[in-house]
Amino acid sequence: MSKILVNELAHTNDTTAITVDTAGDLTMSQASVDFWRLNANDSSSGTDITAWERPDDGYYASVNGLTVSSGVFSFTKTGLYKFDVCVLAQNVSSADTSFGVTARVSTNSGGAYDLAATAYNGSADSGDGNNGASMQFMVNVTDTSTFRVKFITDSLASGTYIAGDTDQNMTCFSCIKLAPAQ
C-alpha cells in the first residue's frame, strides 16, 4: 500500500484551507473561532456594550478571531459566521419586567446597523432576580473591511444591569466560521 503525502488542502476558490507546517502541525488558515465575555456589569440602557474581553483563565484560545474597538467587532476572515450569545442580567426591583441586549450588524463600516437578534427577559419578583436569555444569529461576511457587529443594552430600569465578570463567563458569546462567504 502506498501513501499519499499532502501538505496543503485548498478551497475551490484557490484559498488555502489547511496546511501542515514543518513540524507536522496542522493549521487551518480559513478557520475562525472566537469567544468573548463581558468583564464588568453594564447598567447603562441603550448604549453599546464595550467592556468585552477574551477569557484569560488559561484554557482559552482563538483562531483568526474577531478584533474589537470600543465594543465594535470586526472580522479577520470572510465567511458565514454563527454567533451564540448568552446574556445574564439582574433586576433589583419588580419595576423591570422586560430588559435585554440587542445584536446589530453593519455592512457599511458602521455607517448604519441593522437589528440581527434580541435577547430579552425580566421578572416581576421583589428584586434580586437573576435572568438569563440567549440569542443566535448568522452574519455572511463578504468584505472584512465593511462588516461590523456590536451589542446594545436595552430597556434597563434603574438598578438593573447586564452581568459581567472578569473571572467567569456570565454574559458571553462565541463566534464560529461555518463556511466560506455565500
Image (spheres, helix red, strand yellow):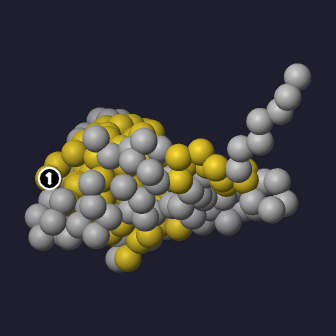
Kind of residue at disc 1: Asp
Vertical placement of residue 182 versus 30, above or below: above
Please give the name of the residue rendered at 71% of the width and 44% of the height, measured from the top-left corner: 6
Query: Residue 121: horizontal and vertical position, in percent?
Result: 31, 38
Q: Report if residue 60 is visible in the image.
A: yes
Question: Dividing the image into 4 quarters, which one contains the N terminus?
Answer: top right
Residue 146 location, x and y as percent? 23, 66
Query: How far across and how far down the image is residue 94, in percent?
Result: 29, 43
Give the crowd class for mark 1: few <14, some 14-19, many >=20 residues within 10 Å: few
Q: Quadrant of the C terminus?
A: top left
Residue behind mark 1: 114
- Left or right relative to 173: residue 110: left
Q: Residue at 27%, 54% (x, y): give it.
A: 142
Q: Is residue 16 left or right of residue 82?
A: right
Q: Nearer the viewer, residue 77 or 1?
A: 1
Residue 88 appearing in the image? no
Give the residue at the far right of this rendering: 1
Residue farthest along the front direction in this orientation:
2
